[in-house]
Amino acid sequence: MGENINFELKKTNNIVVFKLNEKRFDASIAGFVKGEFTILLHTEDVKKLVIDLSEVEYCDSSGLSAILLAFRILQSNEGFIRIASPTKNVKTLIEISQLDRVLTVCNTVNEAIKDLENL
């Protein structure tokens, strides 16, 4: 199942945008996404990451845990992360789980990139 995860990576200056092109961000793909984040953040020396969730309609705790993994890796490397364009359901989940206290959520990818450029 893991080999057909659909995502895009774009690098602008020193900011990487990870766009998950999946409707569901749950246990079936969270492990794969964690693997991608680990490889990306440990081997590419990425310090600024935007996770574009505009395509994700459903996210569960395993999806959030993948995002938190990226957050922890970046934090330990003095990096920064932004969540961009979450759908209403995903944004509600982030707020309910109070992750909006540790994760900066931006309405658009451009807003997230601008925010990171100022750091």
Image (cartoon, rainbow, N blue to C red):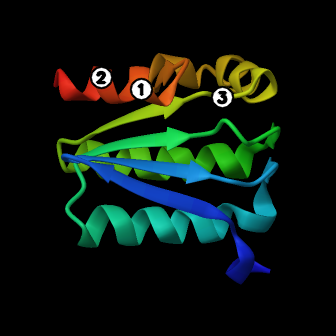
- Mark 3 vs mark 2: in front: 2
Horizontally, residue 89 falls left or right of residue 102, namely right
Residue in the image at 60% along x and 61% along y: 7
Where disc 2 sits, the SS reads helix
Quarter of the image for residue 79 reads top left
Which residue bears the numbered disc 2?
A: 114
Q: Earlier in the sequence, mark 3 or mark 2?
A: 3
Which residue bears the numbered disc 3?
A: 86
Where disc 3 sits, the SS reads loop
Where disc 1 sits, the SS reads helix
Which residue bears the numbered disc 1?
A: 110
From the top left corner, tell me how far across and down residue 10 is, in percent: 40, 54
State the separation of the CA atoms marked 3 and 2: 17 Å
Kind of residue at disc 1: Asn
Kind of residue at disc 2: Lys
Crowdedness of circle 2 by 10 Å Cα count: few (<14), some, many (20+)?
Answer: few
From the top left corner, tell me how far across and down residue 63 is, in percent: 68, 49
Q: Are marks 2 and 1 in contact (CB under 8 Å)?
A: yes
